[in-house]
Image (cartoon, grey):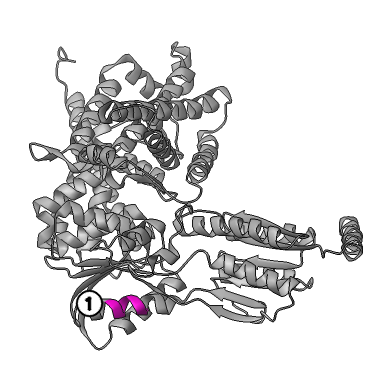
Amino acid sequence: MRKLLLGSVALGLMLAAGVAQAQEKKTIAVSIPAADHGWTGGVVYHAEQEAKALEARYPGLKVIVKTSPDGASQANALEDLTTQGIDALVTLPHNSDELTDPIRQVKSKGVFITVVDRALTDNTVADLYVAGNNPALGRVAGAYIKEKLNGKGNVVVIRGLPIVIDEERNKGFDEGIAGSDIKVLDRQFGNWSRDDAFKIMQDYLSKYPQIDAVWTQDDDMAVGVLEAINQAKRTDIQFVIAGAGMKDMIKKVMDGDKMIPVDILYPPAMVAVAMDLTAAGLYDKLPVRGSYILDATLVTKENASQFYYPDSPF
Amino acid sequence: MSDTTTTAGEKRSLRDIDLRAVAPFVALAVLLVLGALVNPNFLGMDNLLNVLTRSAFIAIIAVGATFVISAGGLDLSVGSMSAFVAGVMILFMNSGAVAGIFPMLAAAMLLAVVVGGLCGLANGTITTVGRIEPFIVTLGTMGIFRALVIWLAEGGSIAMKAPDLRAAYRPVYFGNVLGVPIPVLVIIAVGLIGAFILYRTAFGRHVIAVGSNEDVARYSGIPVNRVRTLTYVIQGVCVAIAVLVYVPRLGAATPTTGLLWELQAITAVVIGGTALRGGVGRIWGTICGALILEVVGNIMVLSDLVSEYLIGAVQGAIIIIAMLVQRSLMRRR
C-alpha cells in the first residue's frame, strides 16, 4: 500500500514536471516474448530499433522494451511495467487465454492498450489491434501453387505447432487450392524448427515418389526442406513456398532462386508498426483506435528489395 | 573369468546378462518389422540410411549420458550445450581467424571439443565441489547455455557465411565411405571408444562403482568427485562430437537447435538398459535406444494410419511397449 502511495505521488510529481516543461513526458511499454525462435527474434530486433527511432522523433518519450520467456512471466512483467507508470502498452502476448486478464488490469489504470499479432479473448480490451493475416497467408500460398501447377499436382505440407495461428493458415491454404485437382499428400507438424522440417521432408521423400511442390508456411522450416531435397537429388519438386519474410529467403527471391520463387509476408516488423501508431496516437492525437491488419503480401522478384532487412537477425 | 568351474547358478546369471543386453535390439527388430508392414518404402536403403544418419546426434550424446547416468549423475543441459557449442564453432569459422579451408575446419573442430569439454567440466565441478544435486545444476546451465546462444544469435540464427567452407564441411554429414554415411561411422567410433573406456579401463569400473554405492566407492579409495566430474567432461566432449556432425547438415545454429535433446538422450539411455539410479551402463544398448527413438518417429511419418495430432501419443505408447517387451525378456530366465 505504501509503495502504491509513493508510486502515485512520484507519478503526480512526474506529471507536474511534464506539464511544466514544453515537451510532454510520456512512456510507452513494449512487452513481447523473448527471442525463442527466428520470428520472435525479429520481433525483438524491430521493437528495439523502433524504440530508438521513436525516442529520437518525440523528445520526452521513453520506450521500455521488455521480453519474457513465457506467459506467466509476461503477466509479472506487465505488473512491473504498470507500477512504473506508463501511458501506453504495446504487447505481443504469449497466448491469449492466459494474458487477457493481466492486460485488462493494465487497461483499468487508464493505459492505452495496443495488442499485436495474437488477439485477446475479449475484444474490448485492446484499443488498437495490429496483426498479420493468417488465413490470407495460407490462401495466398494456396492460390500461387494452384496457378503455378495449372490446377493439378501433388503437394506436401509441413505445419507449425498445433495452435490457432497454424489452423487458420491451413484453412486458408485449403481455400486457396479449392476447386483444383491439387492433391495434398500429407500434413505433419514441423514445430517451426529447421531440424524437424529436415527430418519430415526426408521422410516425405522416401514415402512419395512424385511431389510437385512443398508448402511450409515458415521460412525457418524451408531451410531444412531445401537441404533434404538437395540431399535426395530429387528433381520432381518444382518449388517450395514458405512465408514470414526471413532475410535469407527474401534474398533468394531477389536473386531469382528457382526453388524459392516467392515468399509470403508475415513480418515481425508489425510490432514496429504498432509502436509507431501508438506513439502517433499519444503525441499527435491521431485517431488510431481500431484494427490494423497487414496484408499477406506476395513477395516476388520485383518487390523483394522493399522487404529486405540485411541487418535484422531474422 | 575363464577358470571358473561352471555351476548352474553362474550359467544362469551369464545367460541373464546376455538377455538384458539383447533386449533393446529385439525391440528394435520388432519395430523394423512393424515399419515394413506400415509402408514398404520403410525398408528402402535410402530411408534406412536417412534414419541411421539422423540418429547420430542423439546416439553420440547418449553415449556420454550413459557415463553420467551410470555414475549416478544426470545432465539436463546437453541440448542447450549443443546449440551453444554449435554457435561458438560457427562464429569462430565466420571470424576467419585461421587461413585456409582445412586448417580452419580443423581449428574449429578442436575449439568445439574444447568448449564442450569445458562446459562439461563446469557442470561436473559445480555438482561435485558445490555439492548440489546434478538435476538443479544442469537445469541451471541448461538455461545459461540456451540464453547464451540466443544472445550470440541476437535471437535469429548463426549461419556459416563462407560458402567454400560450407561446401568443404558439408560431406561430414552428407558424405559416405564405401556407402556408409560418415555420421554412422562416427556413431560406431564413439561407441567403440565409449565401450572400451567403460568396460575395459579402471576408470570405467570406478564409474560403475560410484554409481552403485558412493560410500563404498569412497571407502575403497576411489576419488569419487574426480570420477563424477570426468563423466561430465566425457558428456561435454560427446556433445561436441555430435555438434561436429550437426553443423554441416544445415550450416547454422538457431534458438531451436538441440531443443529437448536432453530428454531424448536420457530416454535412449534408459531404453538401452542403463539404470537411471546408476551402477549399470550399457553403451551399445544406448545407441540402440537412440535408433529406436528415431525409427519410431520415422514410422509415424511414413504411416497414414495416425492423425498428425495423435503422433505424440502413439510415439509415447510405442516407447512404453518397447520397454515392456524388454522387461518381459529380462524376467524370463
Closest to the observer, B50 or A307: A307
Q: Which residue is mark 1?
A: A148
Task: Residue A177 in the image: state x and y as whole percent.
Answer: 28, 82
Left or right: residue B244 compared with residue A268: left
> Residue B14 in the image: x percent, y percent?
19, 28
Q: Residue furthest bottom?
A: A179
B205 relative to A46, above or below:
above
Identified at 50% across, 46% down, the residue is B150
Query: Which amino acid type is shown beneath numbered disc 1?
Result: Lys
> Residue placed at 26% from the left, 59% from the top?
A200
Residue B279 visible? The answer is no
Report the magenta stretch's main SS.
Answer: helix
Residue A163 appears in the figure: yes
Say which quarter of the image contains residue A282.
bottom right
Q: Quadrant of the C terminus of chain A?
A: bottom left
Q: Chain of mark 1?
A: A
Circle 1: element type: helix
- Residue A204 horizontal/vertical position (percent): 20, 62
Q: B21 or A227, which is in the foreground? A: A227
Residue at image point 16% right, 58% down: B34
In the rendered image, the vertical position of residue A266 relative to residue A9, given as above or below? below
Magenta segment: A139-144
Q: Is residue B34 magenta?
A: no
Is A207 situated above or below B81?
A: below
Asked if the stretch drawn in magenta spans residue A143, the answer is yes
Quadrant assignment for the N terminus of chain A: bottom right
